[in-house]
Amino acid sequence: MASGNAYEQLISKHREMNTLQTISWGLNWDQDVMMPPKGLKSRARELEYLAGLIHDMVIDEEIGELLDACESDESVIGDRLSVSAVNVREIRRGYDMAVKLPSQLVKDLTSASSLARAAWADAKKNNDFKGFAPQLEKLVALLREKADCLGGGEDGGEKWDALAEEYEPGCKARDVEAVFKPLRERLVDLVGRLAESSYQPKDVVNHVEVDFDQQLSFAKVIAGKIGFDFEGGRLDTSSHPFCSGFGYGDCRMTTRIHKNKMPDALSSTMHESGHGMYTQGTLEEHAGTPMGSYVSLGIHESQSRLWENQVGRSEAFWKWCMPLMHEHFGEKFAGVHARDVYESLNIVERSLIRTQADEVTYNLHIMIRFELELALVRGDLNVADLPGAWNEKYKDYLGIDVPDDGVGCLQDIHWSLGAIGYFPTYTLGNLYSAQFYEKANQELGDLHAMFEQGDFTTLLGWLRKNIHEHGMRYRAGELCEVVTGEKLKADALLRHLEGKYGEVYKL
Amino acid sequence: MASGNAYEQLISKHREMNTLQTISWGLNWDQDVMMPPKGLKSRARELEYLAGLIHDMVIDEEIGELLDACESDESVIGDRLSVSAVNVREIRRGYDMAVKLPSQLVKDLTSASSLARAAWADAKKNNDFKGFAPQLEKLVALLREKADCLGGGEDGGEKWDALAEEYEPGCKARDVEAVFKPLRERLVDLVGRLAESSYQPKDVVNHVEVDFDQQLSFAKVIAGKIGFDFEGGRLDTSSHPFCSGFGYGDCRMTTRIHKNKMPDALSSTMHESGHGMYTQGTLEEHAGTPMGSYVSLGIHESQSRLWENQVGRSEAFWKWCMPLMHEHFGEKFAGVHARDVYESLNIVERSLIRTQADEVTYNLHIMIRFELELALVRGDLNVADLPGAWNEKYKDYLGIDVPDDGVGCLQDIHWSLGAIGYFPTYTLGNLYSAQFYEKANQELGDLHAMFEQGDFTTLLGWLRKNIHEHGMRYRAGELCEVVTGEKLKADALLRHLEGKYGEVYKL
């Protein structure tokens, strides 16, 4: 087999698999956004059948043979950052992860997480951790087994690393710990100082009732103005906002709209637009290959957080946006100024629920989950002791008492799905976004001045060139170094948070 | 291989193929209704890949072996109207049609119709039949070759029959001719008498401008009231209304909305709801098998036409609907009475364009196309002579001069797609709908009195029991005999049209 040919065959087979994946992603979007309730059973059959076809293609031995051929060909992999080398590396990663897992274990995991998900839903509703504990125990045991099969991640390492590999390739628990520790200490301190400040910002906009359709049309206007391309995507609504899509050129995102939370709908829209613009910023020539995909969940989240927080929660953004808002909503927000919305969107509160948390405390919610899941996987914490450990950390880091497990350790669905290694990607996203944004601001000049003028193209162009167009060329950590000249650190995020909230709270 | 087992295997394999088909139908719906323009290229790749998978499954030799096993087992096929016998018969029909066609011919047809479609679009725009003629000639030649391969339809027969088999299984040109001839003569006469009548109904509603969203929400109300189940389906908008869907329980239909044509939007909605309720009336236990599918395009069209015309163009329907319309649209239709809308919807005009034709002349447009396509396939008409023959028939049957081919023989896309044998299914639908409706009225009592009270459930229940639930158990002709006690004839449609329009035009 000629190896130049082997590479083309590999890419062609990978693209076929990707074609089925894009269909599957699209069907999931449709299920959440469009499908009538009675379509559920046939949709499940459709998705299950596609998953089977995809799995067969992923573990196809011919992929292994083609990879071997490519890897023995210097012209394909000689330059480790070339398109071909990156594609081969990433297809190899996916192939190895798939073939390393015994099919019985995969089945056991599917069935255990299905049972755990159902048990979790009941347990959350009835505030009954004991009803969930046996299922979670089973799941953790299977995940530890999975981690052993995967051999501790790419370069060896501990069990958690192997599990995180699926979400954040190359991510190591020890590296996360090293960045999270100083972040946690400084944030706990910051949250305390904000709570004690004599000036407390007021929420003046989140009670104004606004028509659903008007909010959605405004969300579309803003998404378009910051750079989301509606010729290549849609914005709809769903109860949990997300960004997904069919194939290249067809990005589907959703936002959530409540009658009395217009700025929330806008934040959610800008968040998803950040994801969407990352997707739209990949290059068409790489569609359906790793070079046309994204680095990691953390890097994806860095793009959504950057547009949601660094842009959408800045005073400069609202100075530009406020006249549009007055124009669009007429008298609804009469007398409300940019500063009012800015302050309303930047209130920090110690609270129980992660998904409702502000930009500062959010990271503490994540760190708690990371520390606990790490302890579970390491075997340092028994599932039975999870509620106690959870409540203790909420007391330590956030200073609040957890009244029951329903709003405590049962609040999130993730663990019940077997997604261990996922939570930290949210805070990694915040860290990367701050470090990228700071660099962009250095290189491009005063970004806030641009936002005030409605110029978002300059920033988007920088993100495209430095991040989006590279696809999976770099691992997250390496991308960070290439783009910012430094390893990931807590400093930029801390400068951003301490700076902004110090100003808002007049510390 | 145990043959009981063979039947189960056959059904299981057929259902897998059907699962991919439902995905493919759903993606087509999404393309027309939801997809952003830049998604076209990846959507084409998705559909093409699925089509390849489906084709491989259709011609899989194992299907042939399983069919052989089933057909030698009396317990499976002994009772020709049993579920198993019907499923085996129809899977056999699809398998034979697929394997009889040489793959080179299939490729040639795909490529020829792709070229013909492009040439047709240009020719229509530029009113240039000569630009389309060579492509149509090529296509007709290939279709004649296809007909020969298929061996003239199920029971032998002429070339046209073999081509029509795809749309109207078991349909014979000679039978169509026998029904169409008396229909044509009486309709030509009726149209003449209506044109000469001293009373001419006026259109008083199709100029009122109504908001797009208000029309759509009203269309949904009416579709729901006549029996479309929105728990198992959707109604959206598209430029050409259609009814399609994903799998069982997920029927997707569209309507067209123009600012100033509210009753047109409603007719189009009731038409598609008729298709949709047929789909929703099949039995879940037969989902994904022929017994859960539809008889033919003609029978499908009978259901859409029945709700569009027999119900939606009746005065009784408007007596019920008018108060709802006043309530929904406020002052927009103030002073408009049921009789006004009824007359507006029942104006007969000799016109050039099929898709804009009324309930009476529509059938003449169809008969012209049927006669011409039959002559083309029989070799009695050269493609070069098509425009002249077309114009002559429009003069003969409709009494109008065709000013150019763009609004003449180039107006429809069907032939350019290679769809010969398709057109008559529209008028067959009208014929079946009238014969079914007349029978339902005899069995159920006064249907108009029920419509005035908003009772559509009684009629829908009758259609479900007599037609929908049978899936493909009967061929169209046999179904007609089983349900109405008579073969398909022109009489019921003529009674319906002559009766209603005689009254409207005060003949």
Image (cartoon, coloured by chain):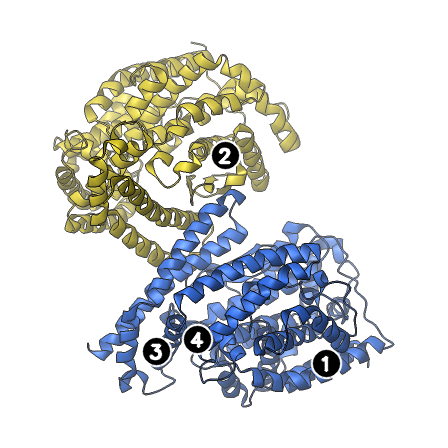
Chain colours: A blue, B yellow
Q: From the viewer's perspective, is residue A444 above or below residue A35?
A: below
Contact (Cβ within 8 Å) of mark 1 with mark 3 = no
Contact? badges 1 and 4 (CB < 8 Å) = no
Classify the position of the N terminus of chain A by image quarter.
Answer: bottom left
Q: Foreground mark, 3 or 2? A: 3
Q: Nearer the viewer, residue B108 or A182?
A: A182
Q: Indicate whether B352 appears above or below B142.
A: above
Q: Earlier in the sequence, mark 3 or mark 4?
A: 3
Query: What kind of element bears circle 2?
Result: helix
- Residue displayed at 64% across by 54% down: A122
Per the image, the residue denoted by label 2 is B265
Judge from the rendering whether residue A448 lies leftward or rightward of residue B102; answer left or right: right
Query: Circle 3 sits on which residue?
Result: A88
Q: Chain of mark 4?
A: A
Q: Is residue A23 left or right of residue B381?
A: right
> Which disc number belongs to residue B21?
none
Q: Are marks 3 and 2 on the same chain?
A: no
Q: Chain of mark 3?
A: A
Both marks 3 and 4 on one chain: yes
Q: Is residue B341 above or below residue A304?
A: above
**Badge 1 or badge 3: first in the primary sequence:** 3
Q: Are labels 2 and 4 on one chain?
A: no
> Of all residues shown, which one is farthest toward the top?
B507
Q: Nearer the viewer, residue B181 or A345?
A: A345
Number of other residues with Cα within 10 Å of mark 3, as a class: few under 14, some 14 to 19, many 20 or more: many
Q: Amino acid at mark 1?
A: Leu
Which kind of residue does numbered mark 3 sit on? Val
Distance in Å between CA atoms under marks 2 and 1: 59 Å
Q: CA distance from mark 1 to mark 3?
A: 41 Å
Characterize the local packing of mark 4: few (<14), some (14-19) or many (20 or more) Cα atoms within 10 angstroms: some
Dot label at residue A149:
4
Residue under circle 1? A187
